[in-house]
Image (cartoon, grey):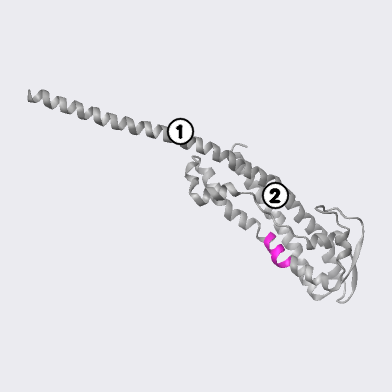
Amino acid sequence: MIRNEARRWVLEGTVIVLSILLAFAVDAFWEGRTERKAERVLLETLADDFEAIRELLPVHQLGHTRTAAALEHFVDLVRDANVGDIVSVPDTAIVLGIRNGSFDAPSGALDAVLSSGGLRLISDPELRRMLAAWPSRLLDATEDDRLLRELHGPELRRNLAEYTNLLGPLSRAPPNEFRLVTTSTNVRVTNELRGILPDVQGSSGLASKEEGQLILFVDSILVQLGR
């Protein structure tokens, strides 16, 4: 009698434990499905953002490449002249030297993921590593671009504006284009100009190189995202 009662208790206890384990398994199953669905949506959104970045980066890189090339002749003209001389500079070099647009990466989805801890939803560890590294990679790759916008570019504009009529070359520059009519502007050579021009040209060249490396990194991310 006592043995049968004990067996009944053991059986009931086993049933209860199995029921609890089954409930946990069902919850884990649905939670896993929910997380995988959330991951798929998240990856699609991230892929869209990085494809947009991939389209914009080469355009921005091309601007820096052309600026560096156009300013090479400007640097040579100023270096070979005496202080106070007037040199005839192609408008292309002037306009590209003083126009410094910024690169704004459309990474709102990734910013939200990083700030909310959403990286945990991504099951691929290599992709998690690459996405976590993106902010620092972007900052490093755009450092010379920032110097052009905030330091070297404004210095060049101030120096040129002091001795040069910039309305001519700017009025002859089609909006949002690098092509200019074939014409030139007279520029007075100063010690300050001699110092500033190599900085602008050098930063433009470095910015182009760094953006090229960033393009390769974006390509790697897109491969991981299946694009």
Tell me if residue 27 comes above or below residue 53 in the rendering: above
Q: Which residue lies at the image location 52% right of the left edge and 50% below the top edge?
A: 114
Tell me if residue 59 comes above or below residue 124 in the rendering: below
Residue type for callout 2: Leu
Q: Which residue lies at the image location 78% right of the left edge and 74% below the top edge?
A: 192
Dots 2 and 1: beta carbons under 8 Å?
Answer: no
In the displayed structure image, the side of residue 203 where residue 129 appears, left or right: left
User: Which quarter of the figure is the C terminus placed in?
Assistant: top right
Instruction: Give the main secondary structure of the magenta stretch.
Output: helix
> Residues under labels 2 and 1: Cα distance?
36 Å
Tell how many labels: 2
Q: Which residue lies at the image location 76% right of the left edge and 51% below the top edge?
A: 62
Tell me if residue 36 comes above or below residue 5 in the rendering: below
Q: Which residue is labeled 2 in the image?
A: 57
**Magenta-drawn segment:** 145-152
Q: What is the number of the mark on residue 33?
A: 1
Q: Which residue lies at the image location 64% right of the left edge and 49% below the top edge?
A: 106
Q: Residues within 10 Å of mark 1 (few under 14, many from 20)?
A: few
User: Which quarter of the figure is the N terminus placed in?
Assistant: top left
Residue type for callout 1: Arg
Please provide percent x and percent y for residue 31.
42, 36
Secondary structure category for the residue under label 2: helix
